[in-house]
Image (cartoon, grey):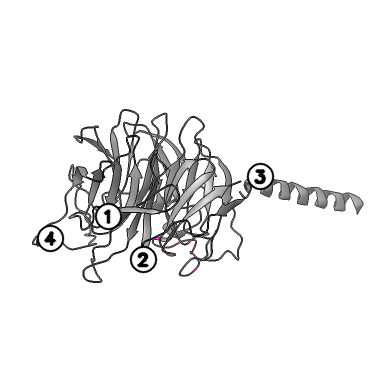
Amino acid sequence: MRIMLWAATAGLFASLAAHAQQMPPEIQYDSVPDFFKLPENMYFGELAGIAVNSKKHIFVLSRGNTTGPAYGAAATQLLEFDQNGKFVREIGKNLYAWAFAHTVRVDKNDDIWVSDKGSDMVIRFDPAGRVKMVFGRKPEASDENAHPLEHPQPPLAPIDGQFRQVTDVAWDSAENIYISDGYINSRVAKYDKDGNWVASYGSFGAERGQFNTLHSIAIDARDRVYVADRGNRRIQVLDTAGKVLDVYTIDVPVPPNSPVAIGNRPAETGPGVETQRPGAPWAICITPPPNQVMYVSDSYPGRIYKMSLDGKVLGWLGGSGKTLKKFGWIHEIACPSENELYVAELLNWRAQKLLLH
């Protein structure tokens, strides 16, 4: 009996030890209350993007100031705040390309890049806020084929230089441009630093090198390209020629009572469920060198995961909710340092500044 009890106890401890190895540590953090200070009568809408430049100014991409019909409305507003959260200016007000905000990024020259899913365009602004370069083309209002959010079946063949529901942008060390194109074309588009088309990588599917909703893209100091393949619940790592180097999944246990930000608890199987399942990557951010780490968000259970660049989960923080330090669909993360994050939330119409301990 004692031997059996000892064996059972040993097995229990072994099981607990194995579980502990699978569950990375929870990261402690604070959220700075009331950090962003908007002018009177200006409001955030769904916050799709957030980025930080070399002067620590923060750029917030909001689906606010909405105009037009409820279906296919124009909903993009690019707002700049200083390092203390004080409002500085709105950039590109009433810009022709504004339709449905998706992400904002800032490059090493402090140029500001906006990906607009609704107009199928990526806009590059200089630090003064003037348009410097445009990628893609907005469908003409008079075009008989201009039907917003239409998904023809089978999908139309991709066209070089044109996007269909573009999502994000990143750059390698030679300043080549990589655009995740995105919801429909299911590819990475590559341009040289002067904006000339180079190539595209990928197609729709679930095999290595195929994608199902490329939702975010980032590049590390070694020119490895990290793609949030959200619909396949994985991160694919490519070289600059599009070769798949690695594939990561985030498989951190989720307590059964974890709250859901909106809707029903994600099912294990069924059409479209991968996007909402735990670990499906929505946003990717890589910290500056020399000691780079990656932060990744999911929609359920609404966490941020800290990862090494070889795919190991080092820790996690947060969860779904409406109060400070909780999240409602983090759509983009800015990570100017390993212990300072900014997050843009769709459902809570807000951005948070997070300080990690």
Seen in the picture, residue 140 relative to 286 is either above or below; the reply is below
Kind of residue sitting beneath label 3: Gln
Q: Which of marks 4 and 3 is nearer the N terminus?
A: 3
Seen in the picture, residue 147 relative to 8 is either above or below; the reply is below
**Residue at 46% from the left image edge and 68% from the top image edge:** 262
SS under mark 3: helix
What's the distance in space between the residues labelled 3 and 1, CA to CA? 40 Å
- In the orientation shown, which residue stands out farthest toward the bottom? 70
Query: Looking at the picture, how far across and down is residue 87, in whole percent?
Result: 37, 55
Q: Which of marks 3 and 1 is nearer the N terminus?
A: 3
Residue 117, label in figure: 1
What residue is pinned by disc 4?
Answer: 145
Chain part drawn in magenta: 263-272
Badge 4 crowding class, 10 Å Cα cut-off, few under 14, some 14 to 19, many 20 or more, is: few
Seen in the picture, residue 189 relative to 46 is either above or below; the reply is above
Kind of residue sitting beneath label 1: Lys
Residue 21, label in figure: 3
- In the orientation shown, which residue stands out farthest toward the right? 2
- The answer to whether residue 187 of the structure is visible from this angle is no
In the rendered image, residue 267 lying in the magenta stretch gets the answer yes
Query: Looking at the picture, how far across and down is residue 76, in whole percent?
Result: 28, 58
State which mark lies toward you, 1 or 2: 2
The secondary structure that most of the magenta stretch takes on is loop
What's the distance in space between the residues labelled 4 and 1, CA to CA? 17 Å
Q: Earlier in the sequence, mark 4 or mark 2?
A: 2
What's the distance in space between the residues labelled 1 and 2, CA to CA? 29 Å
| Mark 2–mark 3 CB contact (< 8 Å) | no
Toward the viewer: 101 or 64?
Answer: 64
